[in-house]
Image: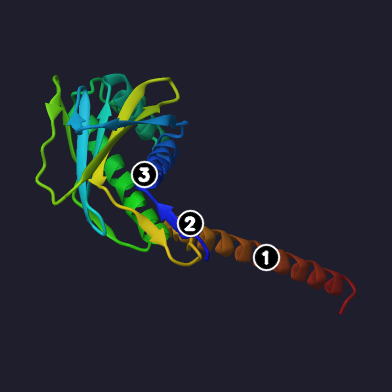
């Protein structure tokens, strides 16, 4: 009898960590990495200097918390906006700025959105998320959220930015396992930006081909005209 593959909390956490590194690395244009070691913790907390939490529900219930130091927050924020073409003089100078919280909140929204897509593709289940809540804080705050988790498990992972600044991701979710009954193909996610870019490239290629054909036709016409035909 073939042994079924079991997907555990750590596997789901690994998927979430990949979403964090992929989204933030792409957004900032810099390398974001995470520790190979994960901590088991008893509860999730929002900590200084900037914390964010988002709830998800559906196939399983959970809570994701990110805690940025001021240095890590400013690096991710600044690199992201520079990568978007924002002039240096228009960037916020303090992590307490609303603009910093708004940008990090939007990035968190993209991260969890990417995570929910991966869950749908890899686990064949669906989860929904609420709008991330991001805030600058100056002392430790314990998050106590009314969820339906029966046997919550909590984990913490350390992330490092390109400039060696640190931030943390904490995940609390139901103690659950997904058991694969049979093999299936994981469909690659379709990125609308890739579709638009591919269509634009095809259009450019078609235009260049048409110009080349027209140029060749003009040469032939000139040659025939010189022959008096």
* Residue labelled with disc 3: 16
Q: Are marks 1 and 3 in contact (CB under 8 Å)?
A: no
Describe the element under mark 2 as helix, strand or loop.
helix
As helix, strand or loop, the secondary structure at mark 1 comes to: helix
Neighbourhood count class around disc 1 (C-alpha, 10 Å): few under 14, some 14–19, many 20 upward? few
Measured as percent of width and height from the top left, residue 149 is found at: 17, 49
- The residue sitting at the right extreme is 227
- Asked whether the viewer can see residue 182, the reply is yes
What residue sits right under mark 2 in the picture?
A: 194
User: Where is residue 90 shown, x and y percent of the image?
Assistant: 29, 27
Coordinates of residue 70 in the picture (x, y in percent): 26, 21
Q: Residue at x 48, y 57 (%)?
A: 194
Q: Residues within 10 Å of mark 2 (few under 14, many from 20)?
A: few
Disc 1 versus disc 3: distance between alpha carbons?
44 Å
Viewer-closest of 208 and 126: 126
Which of these two is toward me, 154 or 106? 154
Q: Which residue is mark 1?
A: 209
On the image, which quarter does residue 19 sit in? top left
Callout 3: helix, strand or loop? Answer: helix
Q: Quadrant of residue 76?
A: top left
Q: Residue at x 42, y 42 (%)?
A: 18
Q: Earlier in the sequence, mark 3 or mark 2?
A: 3
Alpha-carbon distance for marks 1 and 2?
22 Å
């Amino acid at each position: 009898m073939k042994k079924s593959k079991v997907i555990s909390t750590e596997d789901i956490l690994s998927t979430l960590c990949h979403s964090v590194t992929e989204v933030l690395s792409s957004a900032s244009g810099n390398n974001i990495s995470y520790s190979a070691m994960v901590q088991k913790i008893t509860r999730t907390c929002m900590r200084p200097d900037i914390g964010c939490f988002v709830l998800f529900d559906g196939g399983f219930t959970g809570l994701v918390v990110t805690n940025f130091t001021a240095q890590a927050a400013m690096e991710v924020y600044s690199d992201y906006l520079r990568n978007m073409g924002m002039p240096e003089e228009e960037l916020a100078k303090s992590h307490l700025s609303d603009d910093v919280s708004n940008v990090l909140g939007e990035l968190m929204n993209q991260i969890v959105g990417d995570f929910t897509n991966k869950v749908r593709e890899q686990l064949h289940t669906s989860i929904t998320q609420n709008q991330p809540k991001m805030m600058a804080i100056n002392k430790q705050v314990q998050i106590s959220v009314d969820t339906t988790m029966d046997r919550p498990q909590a984990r913490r992972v350390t992330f490092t930015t390109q400039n060696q600044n640190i931030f943390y991701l904490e995940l609390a979710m139901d103690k659950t396992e997904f058991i694969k009954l049979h093999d299936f193909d994981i469909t690659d996610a379709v990125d609308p930006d890739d579709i638009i870019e591919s269509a634009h490239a095809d259009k450019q290629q078609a235009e260049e081909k048409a110009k080349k054909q027209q140029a060749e036709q003009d040469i032939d016409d000139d040659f025939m005209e010189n022959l008096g035909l």
